[in-house]
Image (cartoon, helix red, strand yellow):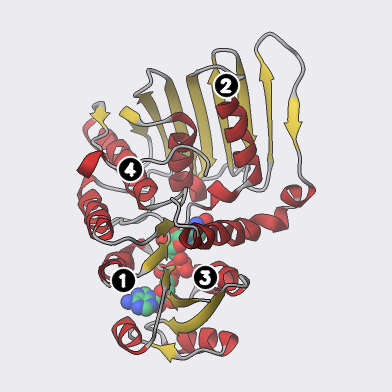
Amino acid sequence: MLKVAIVGYRAQGSNHHAPSFAGLADCQIVAVCDIVEERARAGADRYGAPAYTSMDEMLQTEEIDIVDIPVGEGYRYDLVMKCLGRGLHVFTEKPLAGAEGQYRIQLSDVPLAQEMIDEWQHHDTHFGICFCLHASRNVKWAKQVIQSGKLGGLRQIYARTALGSWNHLIDMVRFLSGEVEEVFAYTDDAEMGNKVACLKFESGAVGTLAVSQDLGLQFQIKWIGELGEATIDDIAGTAYWHLHNSHDVTHWSDARQLDGGTYGTQFEDLIAEFVSSIRESRPFVADGWAGLRHMEIDAAITESIRTGKAIPVRRYMPDKGHTILTLT
Ligand SMILES: NC(=O)c1ccc[n+]([C@@H]2O[C@H](COP(=O)([O-])OP(=O)(O)OC[C@H]3O[C@@H](n4cnc5c(N)ncnc54)[C@H](O)[C@@H]3O)[C@@H](O)[C@H]2O)c1
């Protein structure tokens, strides 16, 4: 049985993370910690575990294998660093840092994410990021179609999103298309809720990434290869592909996924996959490297908006860096 501690029991912790870990047969929630005592107590009561208002005290008292840290980006660094430093498995939310919030990632935020990676690399543990679209079945299906080679090599990618999935979309574009070499971005909005970035990939492919505050559709990705193209429509949505020289469209469908209420199952599936990857000592698809690479691209986009210039995406490559771009 893996002993799991929850640190941060508000929206994400109480609605998604804790229930997902608790639902796994091989996990047990052994402590719930929140600096707001009534939240810690609410979680502790629900899972029959002790409540803590201090993570330090919890770490000193309890025997723990996995620390789940679903807190906002402003609180993340100290908590994650302490747990990684103790050699514990850590699962946390995205983005890894963000002094000005999750939609305005700055170059100055990136070193914090690098430090987390450095700490993690000292230990043989798993560091997972809640990029839950990796568990989305339409995304998995599209990735398999792309990997099969039937669409040819990537030439262009177009991705658009409402504000809430901005961080996720950057991660997804990288997951489906490879490393981004350079970005050029624009916004008409000081809050950056309406922005667009041109992307140049290492492979030579190009793409755009656009966000608007008030889109009805949560997100869409069009992946265009030399021979055909694949489209992913929305969280808990659909996907389809076709060859350029054919009108035959192949749709993916899954009754469970098409039910909008299944948004929560992505958390369950991703967390189940995280635990399995620990058990089986294999890499986790949305690991710390995915968290860092998201930060590097997002920060370059903000910097391009600030300077009006194209900005190279500088990748931190200790020991070349591990990059998982394939399904595990
Ligand atoms: N993966 C997704 O699809 C998804 C969806 C929504 C939000 N998010 C992410 O989740 C995060 C926000 O989640 P939230 O709204 O639940 O977070 P929040 O920051 O509002 O709440 C976190 C909880 O952690 C507690 N906390 C803060 N510091 C603590 C500490 N030192 N020790 C113990 N507890 C502490 C707070 O009291 C609070 O109860 C953001 O980073 C956001 O980007 C991800």
Residue 248: x %, y % from top left? 77, 17
Disc 1 secondary structure class: helix
Q: Give the number of the disc on residue 11.
A: 3
Q: Residue at x 26, y 26 (%)?
A: 310
Q: What residue appears at the point 50 percent right and 18 percent down from the top-left corner?
A: 153
Residue under pointer 1: 83
Badge 4, how many Cα within 10 Å: few under 14, some, many 20+?
A: few
Q: Secondary structure at mark 3?
A: helix
Residue 149 got which mark? 2
Query: Does the closest atom of ligand 1 sit within 8 Å of the Cβ of label 4?
Result: no
Does the beta carbon of the residue at mark 3 sit less than 8 Å from ligand 1?
A: yes
Residue for point 42% across, 58% down = 128
Say the numbered circle drawn on residue 322: 4
Q: Amino acid at mark 2?
A: Gly
| Residue 259 coordinates in the image, percent (x, y) | 75, 52
Indicate the amino acid at tag 1: Cys
Density class for disc 3 (Cα within 10 Å; few <14, some 14-19, many ≥20) is few
Work out whether mark 3 precedes mark 4 in sequence or the reverse, and give the earlier one: 3
Which callout, 3 or 4, points to the residue nearer the camera?
A: 4
The disc, 2 or 1, on the residue closer to the chain's N-terminal end is: 1
